[in-house]
Image (spheres, rainbow, N blue to C red):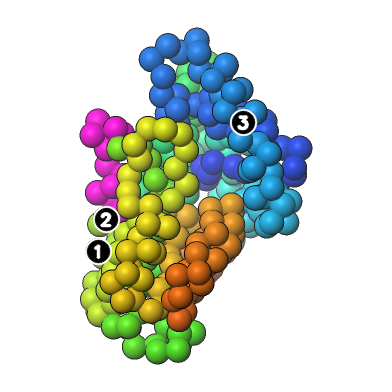
Amino acid sequence: MKLGILLFNLGGPETQADVRPFLFNLFSDPEIVRIPIRAFQKPLAWIISTARHKKSSANYLLIGGGSPLRRITDEQAAALGDDLAGRGIEAKVYVGMRYWHPFTKVVLDEIERDGITELIVLPLYPQFSVSTTGSSTKEFVELLDRRGGLRHIRRRYITRWHTHEAYIAALAEQIQEKFNEFPDPDPRSVHLLFSAHSVPESYIQNGDPYLSHTEETVRLVSEKLGGLNPTHLSFQSKVGPVKWLGPSTDTKLRELKAAGAEQVLAIPISFVSEHIETLYELDLLYKDLAEELGFKAYRRVPAFNTDPRFIKALGDLVTAKLNLAS
């Protein structure tokens, strides 16, 4: 057996020149923007990316000019490889991005050249959605089909891990560590605001389990913390005119302040790496709003990146999948 691990993520523009083509790739995906006539998908993606790229480029300038997602995901892959080696498991860990480099099709070429015979596919999205895990996995299977199935490579998929014990424990510990940064560190006075990437409500109505998965993660983390904190769930990063899951994070901040909350800890529940949604939206946009509203304290839990507790959770997921197959 020659083992490979393939980590999926969405990708992100690394430079200002990348922003427009990245947005075009994003909105070309029918799992992101659904229209009844497939022939109109790319023309519509061109229109949206052309309309949005100046604003998006300005936002990326505020966080250094581009997304750090590729660098961080590569670091996660290296750390996972080291973790598995420490368990006596020899594996090469690959990164395949959905909408930017390194594209999954290019990484699949590398997997073939390396002679991988066993491949575990691990999307870096804890909560399943058709727009994240579903889209990345669907593309991967289509790529395999175009190559005759690559039946010499045995594949196993980890499609959801929103309740995984080590993941829940790592998230709870991260939150706990932030309490001492508040003027009043009593958990009962710190409102936990779990902010997740939104999806259109129609996805949920059509059976996407993303909302229920996210709510279950929030419940388990709250229980792990002892259930003392007031806990809330909101959604960010909606795009387009359709109805998206709410309440939005900015709306929830306004509601909390109106209800008398003074301290808020924002938690990027659906993100495991720092990128535009955490570094711009949570750290700049919503922090500024919290200050305008008069909160005494607004803090944010960092994304996991290469936190050893998170890398261990990924290693546990891979090890469990291997043990099930043995």
Residue at numbered disc 1: 219
Q: Is residue 56 left or right of residue 272?
A: right
Q: Who's the residue at 68% across and 57% down the image?
A: 63
Distance between the Cα atoms at labels 1 and 2?
Answer: 6 Å
Q: Is residue 256 above or below residue 207?
A: below
Q: Which residues are magenta?
A: 202-215
- x, y percent for residue 265: 42, 72
Q: Amino acid at mark 1?
A: Arg
Q: Main secondary structure of the magenta part?
A: helix
Q: Which residue is mark 3?
A: 51
Secondary structure of residue under mark 2 = helix
Q: Is residue 319 toward the left or the right of residue 211 in the image?
A: right
Identity, as a three-letter code, of the amino acid under mark 2: Glu
**How many numbered badges does the structure rendering display?**
3
Relative to 114, is 158 above or below? below
- Crowding around mark 3 (Cα neighbors within 10 Å: few <14, some 14 to 19, many 20+) is few
The answer to if 108 sits in the magenta stretch is no
Q: Quadrant of residue 10?
A: top right
Alpha carbon separation for disc pair 3 and 2 = 34 Å
The residue drawn where x is 36% and y is 71% is: 257
Q: Nearer the viewer, mark 3 or mark 2?
A: 3
SS at badge 3: helix
Q: Does the magenta-highlighted stretch encompass residue 204?
A: yes
Point out which mark residue 215 bears. 2
How would you rate the neighbour count of disc 1 (Cα within 10 Å): few for under 14, some for 14-19, many for 20 or more?
some
